[in-house]
């Protein structure tokens, strides 16, 4: 009789979970992936998808493909009993259910990511659109559609048109800046062709509490990005504190209330309920993350590393060696765990810093890495990076086709 394979369970289907689900050798292990989503968001593509560069469905990958050999359960892990090695799961469907089921493991990999942090600011949850997944990209696209059509109705005053066409983005990190860049390209390009009567009336503002945008970049590149965005007529509002938001206004300590037609919340990470609940050692300051050693093993409360419990991605950090919450880190950690499991690699995890790239609109951008550069080359790096982030040949082909159609016939923004 064949020897029983060890059961490896992965929690989460984001950048980390998806890579693990495909990479862990199913001939050696009995692999199960549990996540409420049976797709994996290609987050760097969300801003472009939201602004009509391609069908938003291209910005996520389905988990179940012909070459996916793991088991998958569409559920949330609500608790873990580390003594009996049991996961307590709740099915994740629209119909509310109290049903629970248990899944046993020999090794578990925690990759449940983070959720958006609203910092308790009143009105954000009810009125802002977040940018975490394809449903959010669709919500941006649908709202864009509405504000352009509402501003086109007869009898709409110019003040009302300007308010409707004001997009407020909170967060001056790469996500907020790329969203601002894509929106200004749209407002200065295809939207002018499809809505010539609205020309010059749309605007984009980026709000951030920090003194500079693009905190992960050198100050020189951040300043370059600021002036590039201003040339595209983006209002950069740094050192700005948001007090509250309503259905159509954003109120700051510095400027009072300003009207908007769409509010995009692109800042802040908060821990997911599972991370809050688990009795493991966690970071003490800022975002709550599970602490691991340099083999990515989580620590029990007594400080002992649990050799059969790995934690990685946005939800975890290595003790004494903080790494950012990026897909790059999640992918490298997933590759490391795949090597540990498939090849019994015993070396510690070592992170290799890759280039940072951000688009600033009008075919301009900033790149920081071995070489720093800006301009058209940076835009090319960003666009080709978008292409390489995509994880299946099928989606790459569809994306090239969409870009060709955009070039020949303009973007299809008025279609969800
Ligand atoms: C718009 C945007 C653009 C970005 N661009 C870049 C970029 O250009 N480069 C870069 O390096 N990084 C980028 N990032 C950051 C990157 O997306 C994250 O760092 C990355 O997604 C983290 O991967 P993860 O697997 O840890 O978590 P996630 O990708 O967030 O996935 C977590 C998964 O766990 C699931 N889950 C949560 N709780 C449970 C539970 N209790 N049980 C089961 N499953 C659960 C979630 O549903 C989800 O499927 C971007 C992020 C955003 C939002």
Image (cartoon, rainbow, N blue to C red):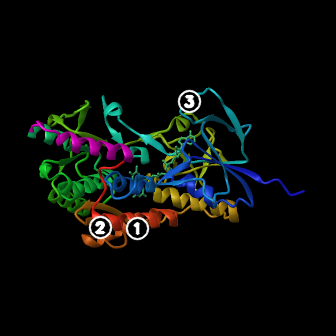
Residue 412: image quadrant is bottom left
Q: Which residue carries the number 2 mark?
A: 407
Which picture quadrant has residue 35?
Answer: top right
Nearer to me, 32 or 56: 56
Residue at image coords 19%, 44%: 165
User: Residue 220 vs residue 16: left or right?
Assistant: left
Residue 343: where, in percent of width, then height? 69, 65
Which picture quadrant has residue 97?
top right
- Mark before the other along the chain sequence, 2 or 3: 3
Magenta segment includes 390: no
Residue 386 appearing in the image:
yes
Tell which of 217 and 242 is nearer to you. Answer: 242
- Pinpoint residue 381: horizontal percent, then vertical percent: 35, 69
> In this picture, is 282 found above or below 400?
above
Q: Specify start and end residues of the magenta stretch as a single range.
A: 137-157
Query: In the rendered structure, which disc, 3 or 1, sits on the residue that comes first in sequence?
Result: 3
For label 1, the residue is 400
On screen, residue 124 versus residue 315, left or right, reads: left
């Amino acid at each position: 009789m064949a020897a029983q394979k060890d059961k490896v369970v992965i929690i989460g289907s984001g950048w980390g979970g998806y890579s693990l689900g495909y990479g862990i050798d199913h001939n050696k292990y009995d692999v199960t992936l549990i996540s409420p989503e049976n797709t994996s968001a290609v987050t760097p593509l969300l801003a472009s998808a939201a602004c009509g560069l391609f069908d938003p469905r291209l910005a996520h990958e389905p988990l179940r493909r012909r070459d996916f050999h793991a088991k998958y359960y569409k559920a949330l892990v609500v608790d873990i009993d580390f003594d009996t090695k049991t996961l307590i799961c709740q099915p994740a469907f629209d119909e509310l259910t109290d049903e629970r089921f248990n899944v046993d493991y020999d090794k578990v990999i925690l990759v449940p990511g983070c959720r958006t942090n609203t910092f308790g600011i009143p009105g954000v949850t009810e009125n802002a659109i977040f940018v975490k997944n394809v449903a959010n990209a669709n919500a941006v696209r649908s709202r864009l559609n509405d504000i352009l059509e509402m501003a086109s109705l007869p009898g709409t005053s110019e003040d009302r048109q300007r308010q409707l066409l004001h997009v407020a983005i909170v967060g001056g990190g790469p996500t907020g800046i790329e969203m601002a860049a894509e929106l200004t390209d749209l407002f200065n390009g295809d939207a002018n062709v499809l809505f010539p009567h609205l020309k010059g009336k749309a605007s984009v503002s980026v709000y951030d509490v920090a003194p500079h945008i693009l905190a992960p970049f050198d100050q020189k590149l951040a300043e370059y990005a600021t002036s590039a965005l201003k040339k595209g007529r983006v209002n950069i509002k740094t050192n700005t504190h948001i007090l509250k938001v309503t259905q159509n206004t954003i109120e700051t300590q510095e400027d009072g209330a300003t009207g908007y037609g769409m509010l995009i919340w692109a800042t802040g990470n908060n821990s997911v309920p599972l991370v809050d609940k688990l009795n493991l050692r966690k970071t003490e300051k800022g975002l709550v993350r599970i602490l691991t050693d340099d083999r990515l093993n989580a620590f029990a409360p007594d400080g002992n590393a649990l050799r059969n419990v790995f934690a990685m991605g946005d939800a975890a950090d290595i003790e004494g060696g903080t790494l950012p919450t990026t897909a790059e880190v999640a992918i490298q950690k997933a590759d490391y765990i795949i090597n540990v499991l498939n090849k019994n690699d015993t070396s510690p995890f070592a992170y290799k810093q890759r280039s940072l790239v951000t688009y600033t609109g009008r075919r301009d951008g900033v790149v920081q890495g071995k070489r720093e550069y800006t301009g058209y080359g940076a835009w090319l790096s960003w666009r080709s990076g978008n292409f390489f982030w995509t994880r299946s040949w099928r989606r790459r082909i569809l994306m090239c086709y969409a870009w060709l159609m955009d070039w020949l016939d303009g973007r299809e923004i008025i279609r969800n």
